[in-house]
Image (tube, rainbow, N blue to C red):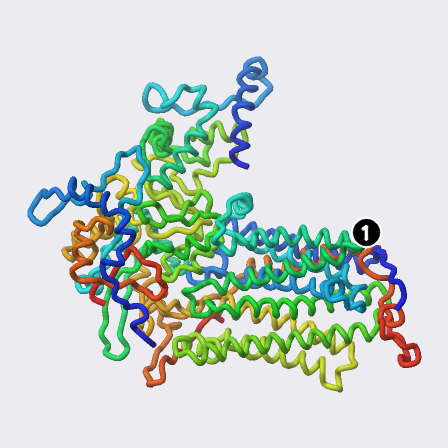
Amino acid sequence: MNPEKMTQESGAQEQPNSNRRQFLGTAAAALGGLSIAPGVLLYSVSHAKPADQPVTDAVRWGMLVDTSKCEDGCNDCVTACNEEHALTDTGRPETDAQWIRKLTVKDRLSGNSKSMPMMCQHCEHPPCVDVCPTGASFKRADGIVLVDKHICIGCRYCMMACPYKARSFIHEEIKDQKVEAPRGKGCVESCTLCVHKVDRGDGTTACAEACAKAGHRALIFGDLNDPNSEISQRLKKFGATQIRADLGLNTGVRYQGL
Amino acid sequence: MIRSMFKLLPLLLGLVFIAGPSYAGDRVKLPELAPAKGDKCVEPTDVMRRDHMEFILHQRDETVYGGIRTSKHSFAECINCHVTPRADGSYPRVSEKDHFCASCHSYASVKVDCFSCHADRPEKAIKRGAHGHSHASFKNFDVDTAQHRLAYKDDGSGITAQAEGSAQ
Amino acid sequence: MQNIRYSSIDGTSKGYYGLLGLFGLMALVGYLASHYMESHGHVVTGMTNQIVWGTPHVFAVFLIVAASGALNVASIASVFGKISYKPLARLSGLLSLCLLLGGLLVLVLDLGRPDRLIVAMTKYNFKSIFAWNIILYNGFFLIVGVYLWMMMERKMNRFTKPVGFIAFVWRLILTTGTGSIFGFLVARQAYDAAVMAPMFIIMSFSFGLAIFLLVLMAAYKWTQRPLGDALVFRLKNLLGVFVAAVLYFVIAFHLTNLYATEHHGIERFILMDGGIYTQLFWWVQILLGSLVPLALFYLPAFSKSRTAAAIGAVLVTIGGLAQMYVIIIGGQAFPLELFPGMEVSSSFYDGVVANYVPSMPEFLLGLGGVAIALAAVMAAIKALDFLPDSLADSVADPHYKPAASGSEATA
């Protein structure tokens, strides 16, 4: 098998739609980047949109996963996600939803093993959106791939199409959902990149927060369109890999250290 | 479908309100709406009675597609104000007749689809465990899946996959 | 060849009502099963986040594929002008509509939100082959409905050929769409192949004709109408060609995969190590569903036996269901290749063969779809003039020579 298939280096030049939005990105960056403490930047400031205005494609949200910092056995990102969205454990793991999961990837030849989280990759060209018959699977202007559960008919074709096994079907009735994470029987769902936190201007996700809290900082959330964001800077400096880059999906989640 | 049924609601209610009192004795009792927080709703009562679903629907698409989460017509705020605790401190569920939405909707026999996905009571009414999802399954996954794991052998010719106990 | 007279069947016998009642009961049970699945959620089925399409899809896709194939007999008559198939054209059109109805009902009732069917019918994402299929299925009902009208209304007969041509082209596109549901799944090892579309077309020829032959033989036997040997043997010989063609596509598909090292994992899974999927593939799809029918159709010992023809058609049907099972469920059971060449494990069944055991409600729902299709055929042939009074060779065979043919089968 050819490992090159998924590990095509994709530098920052392939950054999504950067040209078209360079101006906006730069303008926003000039406003943002306020430092509240040494080394801690309030990137979110540059992206805070007025509450009554819709999101635009001036930003493209993404995530960087630094596998060298991701600790084997640590499950904090998963726990945080489950808590944030009230994903409960029914004791039936085959049908329970998992928005984010820890993968162990082992090289058969060398025995080298790596740990990393896997979730919706928020593709620029998402196969789930292509195949959805009703248009319930969609990509928001700011690059977040979501399911409009109001028009999802539960056909599961998106689950067949997703290369990352990122989606879950809700197999049973759910009560007492979180206000920000409505979810119910018969629809498909997946990682929302904590869209409610993004809209609130938190500038991070539950998983990235938990990872930082655990002292790993293996997950960096940010704006891929903003050349000054931490994620863009690190991508530019160190490069990163897309999982199944051969499919040409231009994922919003990138991996370092694979 | 649902929307068109919603449109019938004010008509039905209107008829009931006009004709209601004089027939009250031999008709189904008018719904008793649960008390809400605050003095008044975000729109006049008669407007809300007729068009609440339009406001909710409009805001729904703005929120889902545009990320607009203003509170005026937000569904979450409907629940926060209108689903209030009973005397004993418990909150009604939508399956119970004293739930604000259910009281009227069951009376008018109009199905609400909102609560298959949305919580039917305010967040503060919901007790959650410290960790909603400890993921026992994660800890056990080696045991769980070992029996139908693909065992790969490196024999130089590529992959050999052995499926033990695949679907029977 | 004489003028063909069509008439509705009596449909007053105990046997007729008994069979109709049985199918009705199966349909009811199927509906109750779907209601059970809807009210409890799919947790009561064998389907999981790994095997997202289960037994209902096996039945549904089989019926939909067979539906377009059942129309072939009519197409051969009106588009390709083969006069000997003309008396069968009405039944062919009817059967195709009924099979499609049964298949679609199963598909719809297995949705997570079947109550939102109206959404599926009103909101379309035109980049989705699934959305196109919804349009193709609806169009098929309309076009074949008009086609039947052209055939059955004497004044409209002259339009039979052009409408038949449109129906033929439409059904080819429809089955291309069905095959492409799988062919377009770029990320899955078992699918993602352009050959899926033509393979589904040839599968439809085979499954559709097998069911057509069985329905035809049953209808004529139970109504005591004459059905000539020549006609039956002509149909089963044609079915044999289709069965062989399916086999060819299956071989070509697997050979292509076997050449590419990238696909060795999935090929090894289906052909050697896949447990139930391997068993189904070799024993049911290839041996029972393809090789045995070919022997029954063509070996001199059986080639003049109507019983052998009927058994062959039954086996083709069973083999077809097995083939669908292997494609749909076997294809999902094999894990997605997230990191080709690496060993992947997680709490979400990455890198392992997914477990799937069909549940009773799923199976009953699938059977319910079959029952609806057959019950609809029974009701229609009682209501309208679909069946020729006689399909005896002396009436329906253009090559009939009284001297050459000794006895005329009426059974």
Disc 1: CA contacts within 10 A as few (<14), some (14-19) or many (>=20): few
Q: Is residue B77 left or right of residue C64?
A: left
Q: Chain of mark 1?
A: C
Residue B111 image point, x, y percent: 51, 35
Residue A114 image point, x, y percent: 23, 68
Query: Residue at horizontal 23%, vertical 71%?
Result: A113
Q: Nearer the viewer, residue A34 or C295?
A: A34
Check the image and report above or below for B122 versus C337.
Answer: above
**For residue A91, which quarter of the picture?**
bottom left
Query: Residue at horizontal 80%, vertical 57%?
Result: C386
Q: Is residue A101 left or right of residue C71?
A: left
Can you identify the residue that label 1 sits on? C153
Q: Nearer the viewer, residue B140 or C314?
A: C314
Answer whether residue A220 is visible to the viewer in this image: yes
Check the image and report above or below for A57 versus A234.
Answer: above
**For residue C26, which quarter of the picture?**
bottom right
